[in-house]
Image (cartoon, rainbow, N blue to C red):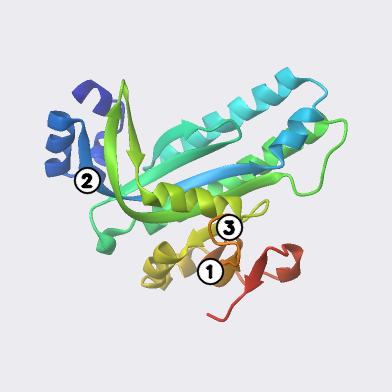
Amino acid sequence: MEAVLARHPPERVHSGLGEDARRELVSTGAASVQAVAVVGDLRLSGFVLREAVAPALFARFIVAFTEAVRSLSSDNDGWFDKFTGDGFLAFWLYPDDQHLPAEAVSDFCQSILPASEHLVSNLRRNSRNFPVGVGLGLGLDAGPCELVRIGDSITVVGSPIVGATRMASGAGAGEAIVNIHLGDLLHRDPGTLRSRGLSLERAVIKTKEYPEGQEAFHLNLQGGRRSDPVAHPGREQVPP
């Protein structure tokens, strides 16, 4: 286990995991933690693969993008967890709600979208037909999780992973959707968002579990308010 932990920068292990949780992880292979989960999903990737001129190039572009995700998550003190075929999972550990890693997570989200735009440009050049709406959608959630060892790697499991995945499924290309709990936590520190030109906007997204819609937040990564609420008919605006 110590060898597995050594692959992660020490400051991330110590500040995000804590000594008690670290000892628990080493001795039992699992530890209770708090984590912010960020799930990325490349919208319409199946259509793009089907229309690819060279499938090998499609795979090469996706792998290069995944390496960029891994690097950017590490640069922003996150843990890159897995590549999901057309997306990814990364997470940030934090000791309690008073130490939410809002700056690191928001910086990662703002950095990953330009990288995804480069990916889309490459995919477009490799496509026979290119549908509208291809791009990266982000979903975010936070809360209690279990950090566990599986073989030679460490992963995180818990309802925030499910929530972030659900939020990503409701995000359009270039959008980030934040589950209601994490959005409320972020609202406690509005200065961090404002300092980075970010804003949160309440929304309703329709999901498989809640077809009539569930409350969430749209994280505006460009600053200001979203100006195209009718562009995504599955989402409705609700008052803040």
**Circle 3 residue:** 207
Q: CA distance from mark 2 to mark 3?
A: 28 Å
What residue is rendered at 83% in x and 31% in y? 127
Q: CA distance from mark 1 to mark 3?
A: 23 Å
Number of residues whose C-alpha sits closer than 10 Å to that of mark 1, classed few (under 14), some (14–19) or many (20 or more): many
On the question of residue 110 being in view, the answer is no
The quarter of the picture where the N terminus appears is top left
Q: Label 2: state its secondary structure.
A: strand
Q: Write down the residue under mark 2.
A: 32
Q: Residue furthest right?
A: 128
Residue 67: mark: none
| Mark number, residue 199 | 1
Q: Picture coordinates of residue 112 (x, y %)?
A: 56, 44
Instruction: Choose the circle earlier in sequence order: 2 or 3.
Output: 2
Where 27 sits versus 91, above or below? above
Are the residues tagged 2 and 3 within 8 Å (C-beta)? no
Residue 96 point in image, percent of width and height: 24, 58
Amino acid of disc 1:
Ser
Question: Whole-Å distance between the Cαs marked 1 and 2?
Answer: 31 Å
The one nearer the camera, 239 or 125, is 239
Q: Nearer the viewer, mark 1 or mark 3?
A: 3
Q: Amino acid at mark 2?
A: Ser
Q: Amino acid at mark 3?
A: Thr
Label 1 SS = strand
Q: For the residue carrying disc 3, how many other residues have a C-alpha within 10 Å: few (<14), some (14-19), or many (20+)?
A: some
